[in-house]
Image (cartoon, helix red, strand yellow):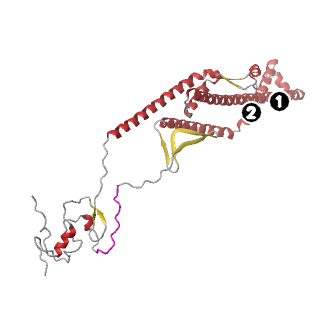
Amino acid sequence: MEAEFLGGAEPAETGADPFSETPANDPFLDEDEAAAPADPNAAPAPEAPAPDGTETPEPETAAIPFKYQADGQEVVFEGIEEIPGEGAIVSVDALPRLRDQLQRADHLGRQIGQYTQVVDRFQKVGGFERMEQLEANAAVLQSVGKKFLEILAEDGAKTEDGYPAALAELATDPRARALMLRELDVLTRDAELRARGTFRSTMQGVDRAGQEGANRTQAITGAVSEMGKAIASAFGVTLPPEDLAEAEQVFGQFAESIYRPASAQEAATLRVPVGSPIIDYPKMHPWFTARAQLRQREAATRSSAATASAENAARLAATTPTRPATTRAAIQRPGTGTKVSNPKLNPNRPDITDWKMRMRMGLSPIADAPANP
């Protein structure tokens, strides 16, 4: 007995089996069932996890404080975090300080370049040795000229031809000429020695002044460091390196008022070597106190801002409704024994297995369906 189709058009002659387990025109099949393999004995493809639109993040490289070397010591630049192999992160507070430090470094670098050019040119023309020789030559010429002027001033007599008698005597009398040469030799030697001694004494004074300046700078640097430690202990706030650098610049301009080398009496009283630096710390205290109070206010402002930001985030999280987690129903795929996800499952849908069985028996698939009210 041939099956008769009731209530539906015959299938098109395309070779498709209307009684196949997965007919293409099944109105009750969803996309997952329509894509199932035609062979019921074939193993179903494993179900891929639903993509959530996110990628697995790569492990992040830990940031470390940014450090650099200054005068052989390691210095940490507050507000900059270095990410090895990638770059660095500069905070908003550290950006002005970084820009100022780069500008000063660039300015000092240009000055050093200009001074280097001057020193190179000075060395090419002979340096200090050449300056000493020029000073000696100038002194010799000055002494000789002065002697001849004295000779001319002593005797105003002139010869019949109108020439000074003293010069005529030197030109005609060998003994007078030899005597003058010996006197000039003594004068030139003495002038050269005096000139060289004066030059070397001047250079030694310059060197001493430079050494005293270096000692003064070193003493100011040490005093600033000690004041920074004292302020950190008294106020509980550590001044950043740029504050200490500014303090060195400020007090370096008034070094004479806060620094002096210890005299013999002061050295005996303080039991220190003569020439040891003596620092007037009370004159430095007001500046450091004002700067520590400023840093305290800045820290309090940042703390208040962070607390307010955290509280606002907590309030926002409390007022934002949370969406309940959605569950996907599972149905049994016919002939495979595999459960597939079906978010569009209709509980009133007829059993697909019973529907196909009735079709094979030549019965109407909706014969026993309850009438719609």
Where's residue 68, x and y in %? 58, 42
Residue 114: percent from left, percent from top: 59, 37
Is residue 229 placed above or below 67 in the rendered structure?
above
User: As displayed, is residue 150 above or below residue 126?
Assistant: above
Tell me the element at label 2. helix
State which region is magenta: 39-52
* Magenta stretch: dominant secondary structure: loop
Can residue 155 be seen here?
no
Relative side of 225 to 356, left or right: right
Q: Is residue 213 left or right of residue 53?
A: right
Q: Quadrant of the N terminus?
A: bottom left
Q: Are marks 1 and 2 in contact (CB under 8 Å)?
A: no
Identify which residue is drawn at 27% across, 61% down.
342
Q: Which mark is residue 268?
A: none
Seen from the viewer's position, the closer of residues 235 and 209 is 235
- Pinpoint residue 144: horizontal percent, then vertical percent: 79, 27
Instruction: Quadrant for the C terminus, please.
Output: bottom left
Q: Amino acid at mark 1?
A: Arg
Residue denoted by label 2: 132
Q: What residue lies at 25% left-to-right and 64% top-to-bottom? A: 31
Q: Quadrant of residue 321?
A: top left
Q: Residues within 10 Å of mark 2 (few under 14, many from 20)?
A: some
